[in-house]
Amino acid sequence: MCRNIRTLHNFEPAATDDEVQAAALQYVRKIAGTTKPSKANQEVFDRAVAEIAHVTGHLLEDLVTGAPPKNRAEEAAKARERSAKRFAPTG
């Protein structure tokens, strides 16, 4: 899985359209193997991003869970802590 794509399901507040769009863009970039398509491929690239964002929005709306929503700030703090431990200088 692409490391830049973050989990968007079951957060409070819910994922924004911008977050869904960013995840779709990262996915298409990964699949296409490029961060910036050529002019010849720009239209199909943009269409793929739009379609994936649309479907992703439906997916997030339709998923159900019994778990309470996660707090974005708490999850971000946990991620920063994991990162600090992972990249801490050794010695």
Image (cartoon, rainbow, N blue to C red):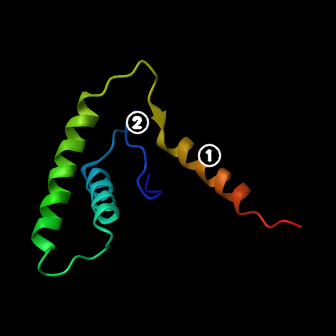
The numbered mark at residue 78 is 1
Q: Is residue 60 left or right of residue 51?
A: right
Q: In what element is the residue under mark 2?
A: strand
Residue occupied by mark 2: 12
Identify which amino acid the numbered label 1 is placed on.
Lys
Quadrant location of the C terminus in the rendered image: bottom right
**Residue 17: horizontal and vertical position, in percent?**
24, 50
Name the amino acid, label 2: Glu
x 12%, y 66%: residue: 44
Q: Label 1 crowding class (10 Å Cα cut-off): few <14, some 14-19, many 20+? A: few
Q: Is residue 12 left or right of residue 54?
A: right
Q: How many marks?
A: 2
Q: Position of residue 36 (x, y in %)?
A: 27, 77
The earlier-in-sequence mark between 1 and 2 is 2
Badge 2: how crowded within 10 Å, few (<14), some, or many (20+)? few
Q: Residue at x 46, y 22 (%)?
A: 67
Q: How far apart are labels 1 and 2 at the CA level?
A: 16 Å
Image quarter for residue 30?
Answer: bottom left
Q: Quadrant of residue 50?
A: bottom left
Measured as percent of width and height from the top left, residue 4 is found at: 44, 59
Q: Which mark is residue 89?
A: none
Q: Is residue 53 left or right of residue 63?
A: left
The answer to whether 11 appears left or right of 19 in the picture is right
In this view, 49 is above or below 41: above
Q: Residue at x 44, y 29 (%)?
A: 69
